[in-house]
Structures are given as structure tokens and as C-alpha cells.
Amino acid sequence: MELTPITASAKGPADCFTGDVYVTPISAPTAPSYLSAGIVHFTPGAHTNWHVHPNGQTLHVLEGIALVGTRDGSVVAARPGETVGCDPGVEHWHGATASTIAVHIAAVVGTAHHAGTDWNEPVTDTEYAAAQSAVNRQR
């Protein structure tokens, strides 16, 4: 058993996120599991770039409403206590709605040679607005 000291939150890098995003690490990817997990805080309107996880990703919402969108235009709005599984190899993005924060635990499994995430270009304003509209129609 090992107790890990509290780790400071850090602002998410601008080349991976739009808006103000803060990440608090939970676990670093180490052998043999290479599990990486963190608590991610999105301010209203903040979200990730498009990205892919070769081994998939699990998002568990703690607070607010988290949007998760895929290239085919599918969008889910997950609320506290809900979990979203992002399938391996599926390009997606996630973040807050335009008017609420979102806080989730993000977990991904990498390998000895790959951290588990391939980052791509930012989500466009048009793509984000379409996701927001889709969620508003679901309510």
C-alpha cells in the first residue's frame, strides 16, 4: 500500500484545451497498469481539443454537466454520478456547457511506449455550438 501526497492542480495546456481547465492528477501511468487518472475542472464553455485514446477512456462526472461529443455529431450530457465510456480509437472531445461548470474524473490506460492520448485540433466554435444546441433539444 502506498499513500500518494496531495498533488497540486495545474492549468491545462492551451494546445489541448479551449478556455480555463484545471487538472489535478490522481495517478501517473506506471508499470504494470499504465493507468493515468485525474480530476478535471472545466469552467463554463471550456473543453478539450479533439483527441483519441487507443485503449479508450472512462469519464465519471462529479459536478455540473459534462458534454461529450464525437466526430459523427453524437453528443451526450452527463450529470453527477454518471459515467461515460469513450471507446478505443473513437475521436471525441469533452467539457462544460456554455453556462455550467463540469468536473469529472478522467481515466485512461496507456502503454510503456504511449501515454494513452493522441491530441488533435481544437473543436471549432461551430462544432461546440452544435453540441450545445443538441443538448438543449434533449432537455
Image: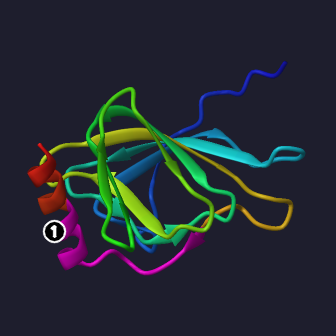
Q: Residues within 10 Å of mark 1 (few under 14, many from 20)?
A: some
Q: Position of residue 65 (x, y in %)?
A: 26, 41
Q: Judge from the rendering whether residue 36 lies leftward or rightward of residue 120; answer left or right.
A: right
Quarter of the figure with residue 131 = bottom left
Instruction: Indicate the secondary structure of the residue bearing disc 1.
Output: helix
**Mark 1, residue position:** 129
Q: Which image quadrant: the C terminus?
A: top left
Measured from the top left, where is residue 53 in percent x and y? 61, 63
Whole-percent x, y for residue 111 in the image: 81, 59
Please tell me whether residue 127 belongs to the stretch shown in magenta: yes
At 10% from the left and 52% from the top, the residue drawn is 136
Q: Residue furthest right?
A: 32
> Is residue 58 found left or right of 135 in the rendered image?
right
**Residues in magenta, as a range:** 118-131
The percent coordinates of residue 126 (x first, y second) are: 18, 78
Q: Is 98 situated left or right of 127 in this image?
A: left
How is the protein colored in the picture?
A: rainbow
Q: Is residue 99 depicted above or below 62 in this figure?
A: below
Identify which residue is drawn at 36% across, 53% down.
21
The one of 84 and 9 positioned closer to us in this rendering: 84
Residue at screen point 49% across, 78% down: 120
Please give the count of numbered marks on the rendered protein: 1
Instruction: Based on the picture, tell me whether residue 110 belongs to the magenta stretch.
Output: no
In the rendered image, the quadrant that contains the N terminus is top right
Residues 86 and 107: in front is: 86
Q: Is residue 128 left or right of residue 105?
A: left
Q: Amino acid at mark 1?
A: Ala
